[in-house]
Image (tube, rainbow, N blue to C red):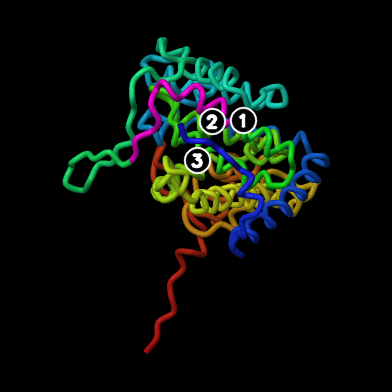
């Protein structure tokens, strides 16, 4: 069975790009911690939005989909799941809530990972939820001509329990030794977890839930306010490409997780940047600003099209009805232009439609 030894990570000379990414995340983590202490109430709206976006995006990566309207209704408990996809979507929501609320009390041990997996698939009534795989699984790739080839073969079912036990022990030892930055350790753990592929179903979703859990346990709370899963879904081609690079030679213990580490650091940093953009809008608006002032400030800095949902997401200090009322007033005053109807409605700045100067 493949062994795990993270001591080599402590001695590895990381390139400048990796070092800079880690430093930037450390810096932004400090700023986020300060803002959380100063304005915890204003951030509550970001939490609920992040849960919805995380659930939708992580399931979408796996081809499990429903409409955004249905997801919001399910989250608000205004309806019940009507098919297996929606059951699995709500299962993800359930585990997400557990991690948000109880991360400090979830150790990185096989028994707890199995329990989270059971909760993930419980609503769908899948009997293998909470159990390691009992048949060999494969990571396949579909070529442009439609043929399917096996890209990677995870370890055998009989080796899986011991492999997960060894992986968790290795991670915990590395954390206790404090010689490896958690931002290096977390993607390495996730890469190994995905190479083990311990379950018959739900490996990708579990890897993203574990990413959130590990970040929480190491003091990185950005995933509470900004969806890491959405960032991954928006760049999923690179996500899969870097995993492919990182698992080459894995069985022989010759793989290099650096491409995946770099990708995850970039994704985490992008989430911190988005967090600062949203809370920065609160600060610039000031405590005495009206909803109109806040939304107008957002539209003045927005390039391209945007929707009412975008405005609500980026202006967490005001409510949905206030944000939409401000959009209506800005439209009537000619600051922005409304286009489309119904769910297809979006807005653009009026100055983006001015006639270009003519040159002779």
Residue 43 in the image: above or below residue 117: below
Asked where in the image residue 216 lies, by quadrant, the reply is top right
Secondary element at tag 2 = helix
Q: Which residues are magenta?
A: 152-169
Give left or right: position of 227 versus 297: left
Q: Which mark is residue 52?
A: 2
x then y, percent, for residue 179: 72, 47
Foreground residue among 339 and 30:
30
* Callout 2–callout 1 Cβ contact below 8 Å: yes
Residue 194 in the image: above or below residue 245: above
Mark toward the start of the polypeptide (3 vs 2): 2
Give left or right: position of 181 versus 49: right
Residue receiving disc 3:
191
Asked whether 168 falls inside the magenta stretch, the response is: yes
Asked whether 331 falls inside the magenta stretch, the response is: no
x then y, percent, for residue 338: 46, 49
Foreground residue among 131 and 129:
131
Q: CA distance from mark 3 to mark 2?
A: 25 Å
Give left or right: position of 72 versus 218: left
Secondary element at tag 3 = helix
* Callout 3–callout 2 Cβ contact below 8 Å: no
Residue shown at the point (65%, 52%) measured from the top left:
277
Quadrant (top left, top right, bottom left, bottom right) of the C terminus: bottom left
């Amino acid at each position: 069975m493949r062994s795990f030894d993270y001591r080599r990570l402590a001695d590895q000379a990381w390139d400048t790009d990796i070092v800079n990414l880690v430093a930037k995340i450390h810096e932004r983590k400090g700023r986020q911690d300060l803002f959380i202490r100063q304005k915890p109430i204003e951030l509550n709206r970001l939490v609920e939005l992040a849960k919805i976006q995380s659930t939708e995006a992580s399931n979408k990566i796996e081809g499990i989909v429903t409409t955004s309207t249905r997801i919001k209704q399910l989250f608000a408990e205004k309806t019940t799941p009507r098919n297996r996809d929606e059951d699995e979507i709500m299962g993800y929501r359930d585990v997400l809530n557990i991690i948000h609320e109880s991360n400090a009390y979830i150790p990185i041990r096989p028994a707890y990972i199995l329990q989270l997996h059971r909760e993930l698939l419980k609503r769908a009534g899948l009997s293998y939820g909470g159990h390691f795989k009992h048949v060999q699984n494969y990571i396949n790739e579909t070529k442009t001509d439609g043929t399917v080839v096996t890209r990677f073969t995870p370890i055998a079912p009989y080796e899986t329990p011991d492999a997960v036990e060894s992986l968790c022990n290795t991670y915990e030892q590395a954390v206790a030794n404090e010689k490896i930055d958690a931002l290096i350790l977390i993607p390495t753990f996730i890469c190994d977890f995905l190479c083990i592929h311990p379950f018959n179903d739900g490996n990708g979703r579990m890897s993203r839930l574990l990413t959130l859990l590990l970040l929480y346990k190491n003091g990185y709370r950005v995933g509470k306010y900004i969806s890491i899963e959405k960032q991954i879904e928006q760049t999923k081609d690179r996500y899969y490409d870097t995993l492919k690079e990182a698992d080459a030679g894995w069985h022989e213990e010759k793989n290099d997780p650096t491409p995946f580490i770099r990708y995850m650091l970039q994704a985490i940093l992008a989430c911190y940047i988005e967090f600062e953009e949203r809370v920065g809008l609160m600060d610039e608006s000031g405590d005495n600003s009206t909803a109109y002032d806040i939304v107008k400030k957002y539209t003045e800095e927005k390039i391209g099209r945007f929707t009412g949902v975008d405005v609500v997401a980026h202006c967490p200090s005001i409510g949905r009805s206030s944000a939409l009322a401000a959009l209506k007033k800005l439209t009537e005053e000619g600051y922005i232009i409304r286009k489309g109807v119904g769910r297809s409605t979006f807005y653009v700045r009026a100055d983006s439609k001015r006639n270009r100067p003519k040159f002779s």
